[in-house]
């Protein structure tokens, strides 16, 4: 699976990821779980800031941190002087300096040690009683609703995919060791992200999924079944993402 060049993709990233509709859905879920007295919040791996910019409110200071200079440049246009280039595994933030940390669609991109380091850093910069809000099971979101495409893809993926780095059990176990306990959770729709059968085939054959590269003949058969479905260019149901709030003791 090829890694996305975020610097190169920054200028048109939002348009390929659901744009304002998906960002509004994600932000609404975050705000629903965010304690009312949150005054200092950091959005880690904030990307273009399209979600970050929606998290402010009266008396609340919101900052974004991203490793990609290209993404940070776009985000800074939305939140001037509040975007920092930084590594989520080595945050340029002081201990216990934040009321809340947000990580949307981040942990699924990180291997075991990196994901653990990101959670450790989030716990470090949170004050006691502070909240970490993070998505979990990101790549499983598309299977949260039924449909003809997901019914075909799901069993093949299950046979070949490695355990997800943002699996709920793994995240909550690591978080628990850091003094973070699940206190709330919700779901939100990835508006505009439903895939057509044709898009599924293109992504499967184009290297978008590491597990597909190992599927061999099963991948060939899967693509043939997807191609036989009706309405090849009709998007199926949007994915449903899970968001959890973990509170620091």
Image: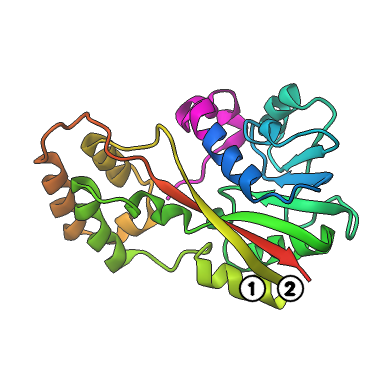
Q: Is residue 110 visible?
A: no
Task: State the extent of the magenta-drawn residues as a range.
Answer: 1-22
In the foreground, 148 or 30: 30
Q: Is 4 included in the stretch rendered in magenta?
A: yes
Q: Is 159 included in the stretch rendered in magenta?
A: no
Q: Say which mark, if any, is on residue 107.
A: none
In the foreground, 186 or 108: 186
161 on left or right of 47? left
Task: Measuring from the top left, give residue 12's x and y in whole percent.
Answer: 53, 24
Residue at left offset 68%, top offset 38%: 68
Q: Main secondary structure of the magenta part?
A: helix
Label 1 crowd (10 A; few <14 / some 14-19 / many >=20): some
Residue at left offset 67%, top offset 63%: 246
Task: Measuring from the top left, give residue 165's x and y in whole percent.
Answer: 52, 64
Task: Measuring from the top left, give residue 72's x and y in whole percent.
Answer: 72, 32
Q: Could you give the CA–CA distance between mark 1 and mark 2, rounded to whole angstroms?
A: 7 Å
Residue with the mark numbered 2? 178
Instruction: Report the quarter where the C terminus lies.
Output: bottom right
121 on left or right of 134? right
Residue at left offset 55%, top offset 40%: 26
Q: Circle 2 — which element?
A: loop
129 on left or right of 228? right
Q: Circle 1 — which element?
A: helix
Say which quarter of the image contains residue 189.
top left
Task: Measuring from the top left, give residue 28's x and y in whole percent.
Answer: 58, 39
Can you say whether 170 is above or below 135 in the image? below
Circles 1 and 2 in contact, beta carbons < 8 Å? yes
Can you say whether 110 is above or below 176 in the image? above
Q: Is residue 177 visible?
A: yes
Residue at left offset 80%, top offset 63%: 129
Residue with the mark numbered 1? 174
């Amino acid at each position: 699976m090829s890694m996305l060049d975020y610097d190169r993709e920054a200028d048109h990233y939002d348009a390929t990821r659901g744009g304002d509709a998906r960002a509004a859905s994600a932000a609404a879920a975050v705000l629903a779980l965010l304690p009312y007295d949150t005054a200092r919040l950091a959005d880690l791996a904030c990307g273009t800031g399209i979600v970050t910019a929606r998290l402010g409110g009266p008396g609340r200071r919101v900052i974004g941190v991203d490793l990609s200079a290209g993404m940070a440049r776009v985000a800074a246009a939305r939140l001037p002087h509040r975007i920092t280039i930084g590594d989520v595994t080595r945050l340029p933030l002081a201990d216990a300096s934040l009321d809340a940390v947000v990580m949307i669609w981040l942990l699924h991109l990180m291997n075991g040690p990196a994901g653990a380091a990101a959670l450790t850093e989030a716990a470090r910069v949170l004050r006691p009683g502070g909240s970490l809000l993070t998505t979990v099971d990101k790549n499983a979101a598309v299977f949260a609703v039924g449909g003809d495409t997901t019914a075909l893809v799901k069993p093949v993926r299950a046979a070949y995919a490695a355990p997800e780095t943002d699996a709920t059990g793994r995240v909550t176990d690591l978080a628990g060791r850091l003094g973070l306990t699940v206190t709330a959770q919700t779901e939100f729709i990835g508006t505009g992200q439903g895939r057509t059968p044709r898009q599924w085939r293109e992504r499967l054959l184009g290297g978008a999924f590491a597990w597909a590269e190992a599927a061999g003949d099963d991948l060939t058969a899967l693509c043939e079944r997807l191609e036989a479905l009706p309405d090849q260019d009709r998007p199926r149901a949007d994915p449903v993402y899970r968001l959890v709030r973990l509170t620091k003791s």
